[in-house]
């Protein structure tokens, strides 16, 4: 079985962005807006800042209190929209319940929406002419490309239909010529669909939910899930999240017995998502 190692796959893309930076007149600049100080969100932001520095981008991080009003956030986003020194804007998710996710995301200028989540950019993706493929979806495709996994003509199943991951992944796979089905919480007997897949992408937010009974022999499985298990300790992240572990949506010990390829968690889609966000940022700067 092939391990779809995102850290290894990311390296060539880091070098490509460094080369692109040398051709640009200035450093691509990203503004990250965070509400509150959740440790997991802060960790993800630090990863973006660290990788941004590696490829020659500038990443600014602004934090607002957890009780910030919607109007204050939107005013800040509108100011960043008008700032020609800022090429990309993202709002770190999730947001507190009192804030309207769609109102805040749609306040971002679609040209600077490097997460690809505004209504306009989601529509362009559905229509087959994406301005920015959302970072996780772009990362999934880049990971599969790195390992030479053909998409055109393949039967692909995406478990999950969220605006952030499942939906964009399904559209992106379809644009690459795959025949795509989507399963979600209301799908009756999803195993009758998932077991027919040649490529299975899982993004449902349920730790270790998908076991071998969901997959056919020889399937390529991409685990997009990021879940925190308080009963385990992750060696890779123990300095940042003590006594906790990151696990995916796939039961790897079960699925690896039948899959032909499987992305690990952590170290699979996660690293590719961060580099893909920066690739979108560089694209925004060029435009």
Image (cartoon, grey):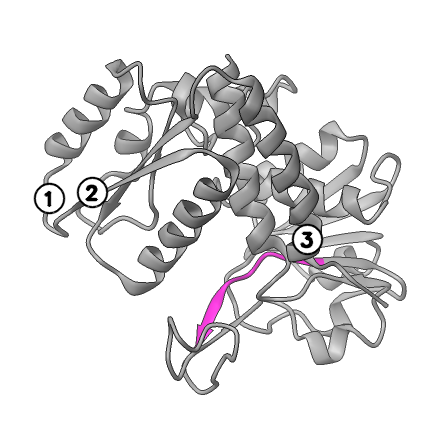
Left or right, 267 with reference to 238: right
Q: Nearer the viewer, mark 3 or mark 1?
A: 1
- Tell me the magenta residue range: 222-229
| Residue 122 seen in render | no
Name the residue rendered at 36%, 50% in the picture: 45
The tag earlier along the polypeptide, 3 or 2, is 2
Q: Which label was assigned to residue 99? A: 2
- Residue 118 placed where, x, y %? 41, 27
Between the residue at mark 2 and the residue at mark 1, the CA separation in whole angstroms equals: 9 Å
Q: Which residue is mark 3?
A: 201
- Determine whether the residue tagged by mark 3 lies in a helix, strand or loop: strand
Q: Looking at the image, is 255 positioned above or below residue 263?
A: below
Up/down of 24 relative to 143, above or below: above
Q: CA distance from mark 3 to mark 1?
A: 36 Å
Q: Residues within 10 Å of mark 3 (few under 14, many from 20)?
A: many
Counting from the top left corner in percent of width and height, residue 199 is at 79, 51
223 part of magenta stretch: yes
User: Residue 207, labelled with which disc?
Assistant: none
Residue at point 57%, 67% (across, down): 248
Prevailing SS of the magenta stretch? strand
Numbered badge on residue 68: 1
């Amino acid at each position: 079985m092939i391990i779809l190692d995102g850290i290894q796959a990311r390296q060539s893309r880091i070098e490509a962005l460094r080369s692109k930076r040398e051709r640009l007149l200035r450093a691509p600049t990203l503004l990250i807006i965070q509400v509150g100080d959740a440790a997991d969100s802060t960790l993800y932001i630090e990863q973006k800042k660290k990788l941004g520095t590696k490829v020659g981008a500038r990443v600014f991080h602004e934090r607002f209190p957890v009780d910030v009003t919607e109007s204050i956030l939107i005013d800040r986003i509108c100011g960043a929209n008008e700032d020609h020194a800022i090429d990309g804007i993202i709002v770190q998710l999730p947001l507190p319940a009192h804030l309207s996710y769609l109102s805040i995301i749609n306040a971002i200028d679609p040209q600077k929406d490097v997460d690809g989540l505004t209504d306009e950019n989601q529509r362009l993706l559905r229509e087959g002419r994406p301005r920015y493929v959302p970072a996780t979806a772009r990362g999934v495709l880049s990971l599969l490309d790195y390992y030479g996994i053909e998409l055109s003509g393949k039967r692909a199943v995406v478990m999950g239909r969220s605006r952030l991951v499942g939906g964009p992944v399904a559209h992106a796979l379809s644009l690459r010529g795959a025949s795509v089905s989507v399963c979600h919480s209301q799908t009756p007997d999803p195993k009758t669909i998932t077991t027919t897949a040649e490529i299975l992408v899982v993004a449902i937010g349920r730790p270790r939910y998908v076991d071998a009974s969901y997959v056919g022999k020889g399937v390529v499985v991409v685990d997009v899930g990021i879940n925190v298990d308080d009963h385990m300790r992750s060696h890779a992240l123990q300095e940042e999240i003590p006594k906790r572990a990151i696990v995916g949506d796939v039961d790897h010990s079960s699925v690896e017995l039948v899959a032909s390829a499987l992305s690990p968690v952590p170290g699979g889609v996660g690293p590719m998502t961060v580099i893909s966000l920066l690739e979108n940022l560089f694209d925004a700067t060029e435009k």
